[in-house]
Each structure stands twice: as structure tokens, then as C-alpha cells.
Image: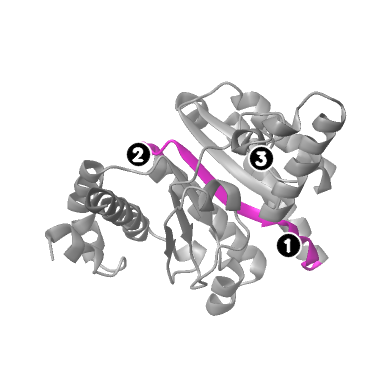
Amino acid sequence: MDFSRSLLAVSSRGPFRTLCEGPLKRSLLRDGLPDHVAIIQDGNRRYARMKGFSSFNGHSRGAETTEMVGDWCLELGIKHLSVYTFSTENFDRDEAEKEYLFELIERKLLELAASEKVHKNRIRVRAIGRIGLLPSRLQEAIRKAEAATCGYDGMHFNLALAYGGKSEIADAARSLAREVKEGRLKPLDLDEDAVASHLYPMGGEPLPQVDLVIRTGGEVRTSNFLPWQANGSSSPVHFCAPYWPEFGRVEFFRAIRTYQGCRRRGRRSNQQA
């Protein structure tokens, strides 16, 4: 086992954490980084129950983790970060919890629109999903954040809101069918590129292929998140035990190691073929 692998075997908690981050970061930078990281932020409510907090507090702690991960992506030079913030299935949750989540997301979006760090680093903020299903105040906050960062290309931060992977593909199919019916698109032109160009955000620059999916909270499934962008590129998935509010820097480094290991194995397979 090489030194970087031995570091990855150590728990991300405790005093050893700060000692291992420097060598591990240098090793990560040397071995290549993913361009697009997609994260399923799972475990806010379970974290809150474990700590004896309200679910609201768990969601607030989770939002703080999202901000930290954004900082790590900036630090490492990762170009695209997509986070699963609110799924179509989440509309079935308790009304009070939904209202709190919508207010929390609205506040964070308005903070992003005015953030000196966002503008200094030219971070583009976009929302993907069935945005029209969200409350009007949240839709307005989305418009403000997107307008304030439109044209930036330093980093891309995508929030999946009212999002479902099957819904995304169904909406793309309806849009393509409409164009064929109106004579603006020929059926023979319906290839993979045509489908990709009609995915979220509708009418905007499509998300690039996902290089790495991360899911926290101990669940081993991808929950309908970016199936076209991730599965089409055979994206590796890093499943980990920490609840999202507990997700730390070394665990993030472990996830990147998952990507790098898959890439090395892919290169060896191609050479042996």
C-alpha cells in the first residue's frame, strides 16, 4: 500500500486529520481531478435525530456543509459542482419542513447573488429541475442568483431543485417531440446530442457529463440523480457512511481517490484490450 492509500484508510476524524490533508491533497493534484462532481446530500434528518436536534437544524447544518464543499472545489480547481438539493419526491414531506427548506434555499441563493466570493471567483449559479413547481419567492431568488452570475465561467454551481432524473428525460422527450411536430427537427436528427441539448436547464447550456457521484448517509443507490449525465459516462460512485452535515474534507478526498482509481483501471483495461 502506498503512502496516499494508507492515508485514505485513516478515519477523517481526530487529530491525524490535519496531518494527512497536506500530503493527500498534493497526491490528489498529481493524479488528476474530476471536472464535474455531483453530490447526493443525504442524511440531514438522520443527523438531527442522532444529535437530538430538530430536522430544521439538520438542514441548516447541511447547508453549511454544501458551502464548505464548494470552497474545496474552488481550492482544488474542480470546475462543476452539482448538488441534489430538493427532489420531486421531497414534495411529499411535511408542510412545515418544506416551508423551512424553501426559505433556507431562498436565503442561500440571495446570499450567493450578493457574495463577494462568488463574484471574485466568477462562480455561475444555476438551478435545474421543474422550477415552476417551486414557490414564487424561491423562483424569484433563483432568477436573481442566475442573473447576478450569468456569464461567469470560473466555476459552475448547479442546484437540483424539484428535480428527478426520469422527469428530466421525459421533459426533454416532450420538447423534442414538439420540435419534430412543428417541423423544426427531423426524426433522423434525434441523436444523443439532440437529447442532451434538451435536458435541464431548458434553453440553457447543458450540464457536462458527470465524472464522479458522491452519496453520503450510508445508502447505496443514486436515487434518480442525473442519470443521463452520470450513467452515460459510466461515472464512478463513492458511497460513504457520514451523514451530510458530518461530511468532511478527508472523506471528500477519498471520493476523488475513487474517481482516480477507476480512471487508472480504465486505462489499464484499454491497454490490455
Q: Is-magenta flag for residue 92?
A: yes
Spatial distance from mark 2 to mark 1, Cα to Cα?
32 Å
Residue 145 locus on image (x, y percent): 65, 32
Identity, as a three-letter code, of the amino acid under mark 2: Glu
Q: Nearer the viewer, mark 2 or mark 1?
A: 1
Spatial distance from mark 2 to mark 3, Cα to Cα?
23 Å
Q: Identify the residue position indicated by label 1 in the image.
A: 90
Outermost residue on the left side: it is: 2
The reply, left or right, for residue 174 in relation to residue 245 is: right
Can residue 225 be spotted in the picture? yes
Residue at 52 percent of width and 49 percent of height: 232
Identity, as a three-letter code, of the amino acid under mark 3: Ala
Placement of 191 over or under 42, stated as above or below: above
- Asked whether 139 or 57 is in front, the reply is 139
Spatial distance from mark 1 to mark 3, Cα to Cα?
16 Å
Q: Which contiguous range is marked in magenta?
A: 74-94
Ranked by sequence position, the earlier of labels 2 and 3 is: 2
Task: Please tell me in which quadrant of the rendered image residue 131 appears.
Answer: top right
Q: Which SS class for mark 3?
A: strand
Ranked by sequence position, the earlier of labels 2 and 1 is: 2
Outermost residue on the right side: it is: 182
Which numbered disc covers residue 262?
A: none
Residue at 48 percent of width and 65 percent of height: 216
Outermost residue on the top side: it is: 151
Q: Identify the residue position indicated by label 2 in the image.
A: 75
Q: Identify the residue position indicated by label 3 in the image.
A: 127
Identity, as a three-letter code, of the amino acid under mark 1: Asn
The reply, left or right, for residue 196 in relation to residue 266 is: right
Ranked by sequence position, the earlier of labels 1 and 3 is: 1
Can residue 131 be spotted in the picture? no
